[in-house]
Amino acid sequence: MNALPKFPYHRDPRASGPLRESAEPCECCGLSRGILYSGVIYTAFDIKNLCPWCIADGSAASRFSASFFDANFCGDSGDSVSLPPEFHHDVFDRTIGFSTFNPIGWWVHCGEPAEYVSRNEPYEMIFECRICHKQHTIEDFD
Ligand SMILES: [Zn+2]
Ligand SMILES: [Zn+2]
């Protein structure tokens, strides 16, 4: 498979993200790149095949008003945090989604969304601050 584009807020989408190998074309760019996203797509359009590149560069988000998370930003104690709209766009509309049991709180530290690192099954989602590198666990119970 091709190397994936970089996702600044999702460390290893190949390990944690819903991706599938497929020869079908992406419905956004029309290219068959061998790999498609297979997670949830929040959009009013009936689309199934999106490639990670169209998610990373924002073209899927702008063409289909798509987003990939049912989430909001939160601080250390789970309290909600407001951030400028660019952060919402970069994290929720331009990041490969991963499955969760609940709408998730996306950890914020040092004034920025943290990077999603991995999931410790069954319930812990590990985030790391992109600035100070502190880690934090968000629990996602089923
Ligand atoms: Zn594409
Ligand atoms: Zn920090």
Image (tube, rainbow, N blue to C red):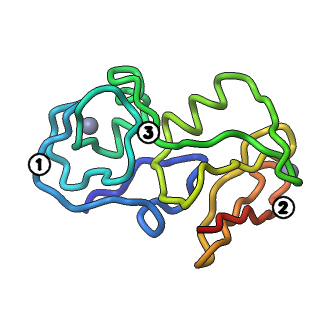
Give the spatial CA distance, label 2 vs label 1. Answer: 40 Å
Residues at marks 2 and 3 touching, judged by CB atoms closer than 8 Å? no
> Which image quarter holds the C terminus?
bottom right
Q: Earlier in the sequence, mark 1 or mark 3?
A: 1
Residue beneath disc 1:
24
Q: Residue furthest front?
A: 142
Q: Amino acid at mark 3?
A: Ala
Q: Quadrant of residue 3?
A: bottom left
Question: Considering the numbered disc 3 on the image, is that residue within a helix, a strand or a loop?
Answer: helix
Question: Considering the numbered disc 2 on the image, is that residue within a helix, a strand or a loop?
Answer: loop
Q: Quadrant of residue 92?
A: top right
Q: Quadrant of residue 20?
A: bottom left
Residue drawn at the location 19% of the way across and 48% of the way down: 33
Give the spatial CA distance, label 2 vs label 3. Answer: 25 Å
| Vertical position of residue 101 compared to residue 56: above or below | below
Residue beneath disc 2:
134
Residue 1 at x, y percent in the picture: 25, 62
Question: Considering the numbered disc 1 on the image, is that residue within a helix, a strand or a loop?
Answer: loop
Q: Amino acid at mark 1?
A: Glu
Residue 84 at x, y percent in the picture: 73, 23
Instruction: Name the side, left or right, on which 127 lies relative to 81.
Output: left
Residue beneath disc 3:
56
Category of crowding for the residue at label 1, using alpha-carbon neighbours closer than 10 angstroms: few (below 14), some (14–19), many (at least 20): some
Tell me if the residue at label 2 has its CB under 8 Å from ligand 2. yes
Comparing 91 with 76, the one in front is 76
